[in-house]
Image: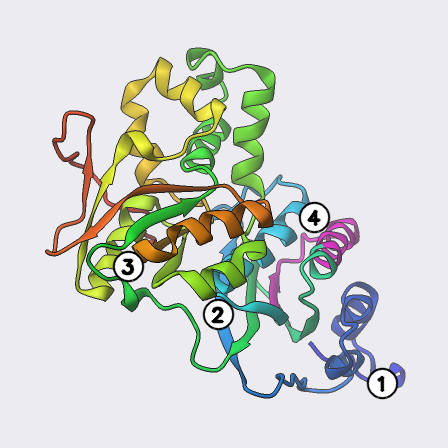
Amino acid sequence: MAAKKPQSQSAEDRLIARHFKPIARHPGAFGLVDDAAVLGTPPGHELVLTVDAIVGGEHYFPDDPPDAVARKALRVNLSDLAAKGAQPAGFLLSLALPKSVNENWLKSFARGLSADAKRYGCPLLGGDTVRTKGPVMISVAAFGTLPAGTMVRRTGAKVGDHVVVTGTIGDAALGLKLRLQPATARRWKLATKQRAHLAARYLVPEPRNALAEVIRTHASAAMDVSDGLVGDLTKLCAASGVAAEVEVARVPLSAAARAALSAEPKLIESILTGGDDYEIVATVPPGKLATFRAAAKAAGVPVSALGRVVAGKETRFLRPDGKPMKFARGSFSHF
């Protein structure tokens, strides 16, 4: 995403100069006039790298507000950095745009991207723009920093650790159901505020970057919940060579999700396996749980303890009667 000199500007160069050069405030971005950027790290620190792409019609609806689409594209990457305990340092943006995308869409998209880049301290460093015959595709590669050797991986969970999760689970999956079938809100007997809450949770996630340092200093393993709590916790445990037992009754739910679940109890499977929560699931050693809770409270991020890490290979979600739940699909998957 490099803007060339004015005398050689193409339509692509002008697009970049209008909408994205103003966002590239980091000195290492060189105002997007070069082919690469420079990103330094503090002494004794390492870079954490992550990348995610979102596609129109797959990860967001074509009529979603462009500023919300931009925020989602950046925030899903910020969520990964938070789960690793890293502080945002910058990002690269690649856009595949059809001819149907107009200036107003791009202006709104850039406005949303600029606001979140500033809010999370994660500046645009560069990228690329291309034309596509398909829907808009947005790919973000984000970079974070942390002290060398301290990244929280999936592989550190130990038997006896507590399983904890931030925020609430299942809102985004229910918000998607409402978007696809608006009449569902009446069946679930949701108030207007509850419908709006679920819709917003699907539209734009709330990454838990305020908790990154707490995760880094307290968690033995962590990952963000993008493909559903059941599937992602299972992945974490498999990487660590352990299993977990989770009490379903302790999974944190919003008032809106509780209302929907009360009206339709079978929704519990969608709540536990649906994607797009972008919360953090982590394992915390017993001796660190109290300070973890206190630090999370100070950071303004709600956390809940759901169960324990155990020996074995099968992660189980237990009903109130102690029997394990069976799921038709363990997690969201594109393939």
Q: Which mark is residue 50?
A: 2
* Residue type, numbered disc 1: Lys
Q: Which mark is residue 5?
A: 1
Mark 3 highlights which residue? 236
Q: Is residue 219 above or below residue 71?
A: below
Q: Earlier in the sequence, mark 2 or mark 1?
A: 1
Q: What secondary structure is found at the residue carrying circle 2?
A: strand
Q: Which mark is residue 67?
A: 4
Q: Earlier in the sequence, mark 4 or mark 2?
A: 2
Mark 2 and 1 residues: CB-CB less than 8 Å, in contact?
Answer: no
Viewer-closest of 128 and 239: 239
* Residue type, numbered disc 4: Asp
Label 3 or label 4, whichever lies nearer to me, is 3
> From the viewer's perspective, is 265 left or right of 169?
left
Q: What secondary structure is found at the residue carrying circle 3?
A: helix
Mark 3 and 4 residues: CB-CB less than 8 Å, in contact?
Answer: no
User: Does residue 205 show up?
Assistant: no
Badge 2: how crowded within 10 Å, few (<14), some, or many (20+)? some
User: Does residue 235 show up?
Assistant: yes
Q: Earlier in the sequence, mark 1 or mark 4?
A: 1
Quarter-of-image position of residue 243: bottom left
Q: Is residue 242 above or below residue 318?
A: below
Q: Earlier in the sequence, mark 3 or mark 2?
A: 2
Residue 271 location, x and y as percent?
A: 35, 33
Badge 4: how crowded within 10 Å, few (<14), some, or many (20+)? many
Residue numbers of the magenta segment? 93-115
> From the viewer's perspective, is 330 left or right of 164?
left
Q: CA distance from mark 3 to mark 1?
A: 48 Å
Q: Is residue 199 magenta?
A: no
> From the viewer's perspective, is 15 left or right of 308?
right
